[in-house]
Amino acid sequence: MDLKEKIGKTIKERRKQLGMEQVDLQDYADVSPVTVSKLEQGKLNITIEKLESIIDVLGLELIIKVKETV
């Protein structure tokens, strides 16, 4: 699973946990229906600004850290 798919899966799961429909998320985050749909499918290159808007609505945060080595 690549990064876009992981982000999309997390967003979809959180949206469902909150009992939100895609239309609710697009309205609250002020993004298009296509943006939410393709993002959740892991098929969208999204700007940081749009991603920030979406994760803020969902009460999520983006954390970037150094990979653990195996």
Image: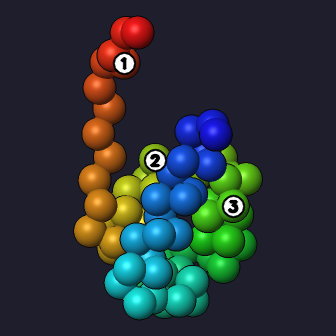
Q: Position of residue 60 (x, y in %)?
A: 29, 61
Q: With respect to residue 27, does 58 lie above or below?
A: above
Determine the residue positioned at 55% across, 59% down: 9
For disc 1, the neighbor class at 10 Å (few under 14, some 14 to 19, many from 20) is few
Amino acid marked by disc 3:
Gln
- Camera-near label (2 vs 3) is 3
Amino acid marked by disc 1:
Lys
Q: With respect to residue 36, does 49 lie above or below?
A: above
For disc 3, the neighbor class at 10 Å (few under 14, some 14 to 19, many from 20) is some
Mark with earlier residue (2, 3): 3
| Residue found at the far front of this picture | 70
Cα separation between marks 2 and 1: 21 Å
Amino acid marked by disc 2:
Ile
Where's the C terminus, which quadrant? top left
> In what element is the residue under mark 1?
loop
Front-most of 47 and 63? 63
Determine the residue positioned at 66% across, 79% down: 33
Determine the residue positioned at 46% across, 81% down: 16
Cα separation between marks 2 and 3: 17 Å
| Residue found at the far top of this picture | 70
Q: Which residue is mark 2?
A: 48
The circle drawn on residue 41 is 3
Mark with earlier residue (2, 1): 2
Q: How is the image coloured?
A: rainbow
The circle drawn on residue 46 is none
Q: Position of residue 42 (x, y in %)?
A: 67, 53
Q: With respect to residue 49, does 13 lie above or below?
A: below
Q: Quadrant of residue 2?
A: top right
Taking the image as drawn, is residue 27 in sight? no
Determine the residue positioned at 54% across, 48% down: 6
Q: Which residue is mark 1?
A: 67
